[in-house]
Image: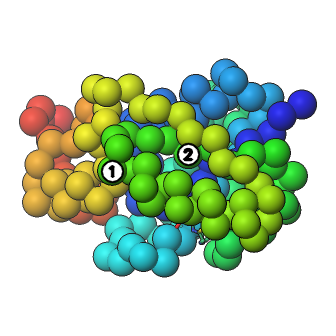
């Protein structure tokens, strides 16, 4: 049985993340999706509890996926949940530099290896930071996020999208 940990800041979770989790759920026996703090990111939209509640709703259709949240080192969480590997998505070469560095640091301090999955090219532009920015300024991000996130964005910042009602 192979259990993997898919960590991220998920502020908010978007369709690129959804694709990664669905792919990981097909490849591995169990996937733990975890909302963590990214110390290098500020200006968040949702707190950790809200992000995890959204993860719960977005992945409830996948029986071998569970969600959690954690404030600490990702490798400590990997040990706590008994993950064999950390899984990360790669959108572009630019992701690779920082992801490789984190993977190397994580293996150095814990021995836990990271596996990379490529994102489908049609979703490679998706980034939570841009989705927050576009939604805050009234742009239409409905096709980029799962339904529970769209509803929370509407509640939170009044985003209404192209179609009324
Ligand atoms: O979605 P993100 O922001 O790219 O996810 C990055 C995240 C949260 C996975 C990363 O910042 C992280 O692992 N944070 C936990 C703290 C930690 O372990 N830092 C050392 C990484 S080498």
- Crowding around mark 1 (Cα neighbors within 10 Å: few <14, some 14 to 19, many 20+) is few
Residue with the most extreme top position: 26
Which of the 4 image quadrants contains residue 28?
Answer: top right
Vertical placement of 47 versus 80: above or below?
below
Where is ligand 1, by quadrant? bottom right
* Sequence-wise first label, 1 or 2: 2
Label 1 or label 2, whichever lies nearer to me, is 1
| Circle number at residue 1 | none
Left or right of 108? Residue 151 is left
For the question of whether residue 70 can be seen, the reply is: no
Image quarter of the N terminus? top right
Which of the 4 image quadrants contains residue 148?
Answer: top left
Which residue is disc 1 drawn over?
A: 94
Dot 2: element: strand
- Quick one: 158 or 115, which is closer to the camera? 115
Left or right of 121? Residue 51 is right
- Crowding around mark 2 (Cα neighbors within 10 Å: few <14, some 14 to 19, many 20+) is many
Image quarter of the C terminus? top left
Left or right of 162? Residue 34 is right
Which residue is disc 2 drawn over?
A: 88
- Which residue is drawn at the image coordinates 33% and 50% (left, top)? 94
- Which residue is drawn at the image coordinates 56% and 39% (left, top)? 116
Vertical placement of 123 versus 4: above or below?
above
- Quick one: 139 or 4, which is closer to the camera? 4
Looking at the picture, how far across and down is residue 129, in whole percent? Answer: 29, 59
- Tell me if the residue at label 2 has its CB under 8 Å from ligand 1: yes
- Which residue is drawn at the image coordinates 35% and 68% (left, top)? 45
- Tell me if the residue at label 1 has its CB under 8 Å from ligand 1: no
Looking at the picture, how far across and down is residue 53, in whole percent? Answer: 57, 55
Left or right of 90? Residue 113 is right
For the question of whether residue 71 can be seen, the reply is: yes
């Amino acid at each position: 049985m192979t259990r993997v940990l898919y960590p991220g800041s998920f502020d908010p979770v978007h369709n690129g993340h959804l694709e990664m989790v669905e792919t990981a759920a097909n490849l591995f026996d169990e996937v733990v999706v975890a909302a963590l703090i990214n110390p290098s990111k500020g200006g968040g939209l949702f707190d950790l509890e809200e992000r995890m509640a959204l993860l719960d709703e977005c992945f409830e259709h996948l029986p071998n996926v569970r969600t959690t949240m954690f404030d600490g080192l990702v490798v400590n969480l990997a040990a706590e949940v008994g993950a064999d590997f950390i899984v990360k998505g790669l959108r572009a070469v630019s992701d690779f530099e920082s992801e490789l560095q984190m993977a190397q640091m994580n293996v150095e301090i814990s021995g836990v290896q990271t596996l990379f999955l490529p994102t489908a090219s049609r979703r490679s532009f998706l980034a939570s930071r841009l989705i927050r920015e576009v939604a805050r300024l009234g742009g239409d991000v409905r096709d980029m996020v799962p339904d529970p996130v769209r509803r929370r964005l509407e509640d939170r910042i009044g985003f209404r999208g192209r179609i009324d009602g």
